[in-house]
């Protein structure tokens, strides 16, 4: 295997030259990796779901208020 350094822009330019079927194949390769959600993020979402279940109206109003 040979490693060649390219910028992101160069990579994008190369991808644009691929055929549609090659782009689909590349897409499948990129998204086939394990994309696990970090536990910290899962905890934040679970907390927000719990808050919503206990106070749905309050949570909706509170989440719409912008803080400056």
Image (cartoon, helix red, strand yellow):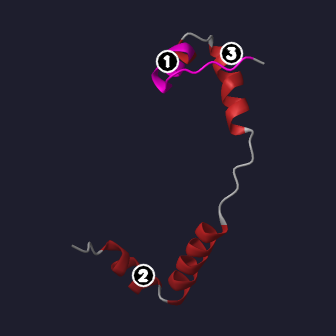
Q: Give the x, y percent position of residue 37.
A: 66, 59
Q: Secondary structure beneath disc 3?
A: helix
Q: Give the x, y percent position of residue 1.
A: 78, 18
Q: Please report whichever mark, 1 or 3, sits nearer to the chain's N-terminal start.
A: 1
Instruction: Say few, some or many: other residues with alpha carbon within 10 Å of mark 2 (under 14 / 14 to 19 / 20 or more).
Output: some
Query: Which is more foreground, mark 1 or mark 2?
Result: 1
Q: Which residue is mark 1?
A: 10
> In what quadrant of the picture does the C terminus appear?
bottom left
Q: Give the x, y percent position of residue 47.
A: 57, 80
Residue 43 against residue 33 in the figure, above or below: below
Which residue: 40% across, 77% down? 60
Residue 68 against residue 24 in the figure, above or below: below
Which residue: 73% across, 31% down? 29
**CA distance for labels 1 and 2:** 45 Å
Residue 64 against residue 11 in the figure, above or below: below
* Magenta span: 2-14
Residue 59, numbered circle: 2
Q: Is residue 13 left or right of residue 23?
A: left
Residue 51 against residue 2 in the figure, above or below: below
Q: Please report whichever mark, 1 or 2, sits nearer to the chain's N-terminal start.
A: 1
Residue 2 or 36: which is nearer the viewer?
2
């Amino acid at each position: 295997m040979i490693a060649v350094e390219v910028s992101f822009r160069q990579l994008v330019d190369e991808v644009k030259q691929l055929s549609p079927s090659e782009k689909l194949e590349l897409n499948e390769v990129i998204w086939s990796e394990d994309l696990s959600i970090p536990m910290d993020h899962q905890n934040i979402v679970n907390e927000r779901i719990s808050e919503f279940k206990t106070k749905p109206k309050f949570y909706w109003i509170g989440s719409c208020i912008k803080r400056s």
